[in-house]
Amino acid sequence: MAKVVCVLYDDPVDGYPTSYARDDLPTVKDYPDGQTLPSPKAIDFKPGTLLGSVSGELGLRKYLESLGHELIVTSSKDGPDSELEKHLHDAEVIISQPFWPAYLTADRIARAPKLKLALTAGIGSDHVDLQAAIEHNVTVAEVTYSNSHSVAEHVVMMILALVRNYIPAYKWVIKGGWNIADCVERSYDLEGMHVGTVAAGRIGLRVMRMLKPFDVHLHYTDRQRLPLSVEEELNLTWHPTREELYSACDVITLNCPLHPETEHMINDKTLKLFKRGAYLINTARGKLCDRDAIVRALESGQLAGYAGDVWFPQPAPQDHPWRTMPYHGMTPHMSGTSLSAQARYAAGTREILECYFEGRPIRDEYLIVKGGALAGTGARSYSKGNATGGSEEAAKFKKIK
Ligand code: NDP
């Protein structure tokens, strides 16, 4: 029987919810490209409940224990004394969410001789050293598409929040003020601006589609060009390089995975190519950007705003400069873990586990690494190598109540 270790974020500080703001979730039938939603044989949770925190257990306990497997659920993931470390030696499956990533470094993978499956409940498996997974024949899978639309909605929200100066204006209300001039001295309309995405995959393309009615000029760059019909439908300007896109846009949103090719692609040098006063939105991965270069660009005015929900490491230490830099709209990593998204990726996690334990193939679109090579979505969207370096720093985080 297998040991399954599931690393999830902590329950709310006031305890696991006993009631919710809404009674149900809207029905989503399929994804736009025809991919079907997760289809496990059964689920043991109520969609719309909190599944991503420790007590939610991704709704997996009944299923796994009914098969005789052992399920360990913990939020303790960083540092040598963490719960995760204690179970590495005999874990066969490690499940983790990108919001609270169990960093599976080469060292940890080497100390997990029984590990067969690293399962990302969500999208983005950069917290696993993919090169080490390739070398140790560990399968890496994620629930492709499960939260892409959730993130795209967050991106649109953040673009509007920055351009319209929403967060400082909201703060004036809380402070008891009516300071219109203070609210609007950095407030603009999005209409007419040039908005570009680095990567037009599931999230990037969705963002472009949602922004079209704002009468903006849409730009993109990607490793592969979109079909001409899509370019024409959205009136997209294609840029063969990221650098060309940077200089053409007022608003730039990053929507590519983190892998050796994209790590620190936004740095002092590339920020110089941006228009002065550009806005940068990054809900993809913190390490796409050089942390201190972002702070410098905001302080100098080269960037007018930066927003996103992804940091490095996660959780971000209390003294992470993105918490206090000017003109930011950061949140903790939450865009892909709305209650709506959780229902989809918990079902996808169950589907992948059912396939694994029944010896059935995992859907190709869920695969990142298999059989000692990048596979499926991984072969298309990632590059070989390791982008998890430096994750030991996550142990510095101290929880606040
Ligand atoms: P997709 O796989 O649909 O899209 C990724 C796109 O990135 C693909 O079109 C891929 O190109 C492109 N790409 C890869 N490398 C490069 C590169 N070097 N330059 C330009 N484009 C590149 O994934 P999603 O859109 O669903 O998700 C994208 C990323 O967003 C995830 O990898 C994850 O890091 C992040 N994410 C964040 C979440 C959050 O909660 N904040 C939740 C979900 C995802 P091609 O395939 O053509 O090679």
Image: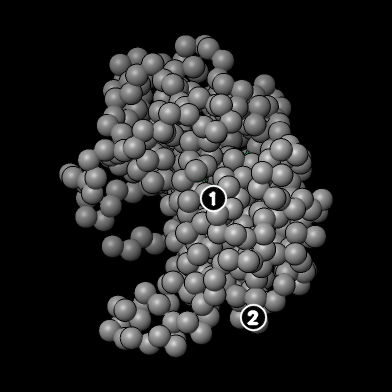
Residue 343 in the figure: left or right of residue 103:
left
- x and y, in percent, of residue 262 in the image: 71, 51
Looking at the rendered structure, the number of numbered marks drawn on it comes to 2
183 versus 16 height, above or below? below
Circle 2 residues within 10 Å: few <14, some 14–19, many ≥20: some
Residue 177 in the figure: left or right of residue 95:
left
57 versus 203 height, above or below? above
* Nearer the camera: disc 2 or disc 1: 1
Whole-number angstrom distance, CA of label 2 to CA of label 1: 28 Å
- Asked which secondary structure carries label 2, the reply is loop
Q: Do the residues labelled 2 and 1 touch (CB within 8 Å)?
A: no
Taking depth in this image into account, of 90 and 238 the one nearest to the observer is: 238
Which kind of residue does numbered mark 2 sit on?
A: Gly
Residue that carries the numbered disc 2 in the rendered image = 301
Q: Which mark is residue 210?
A: 1
Residue 246 in the figure: left or right of residue 370:
right
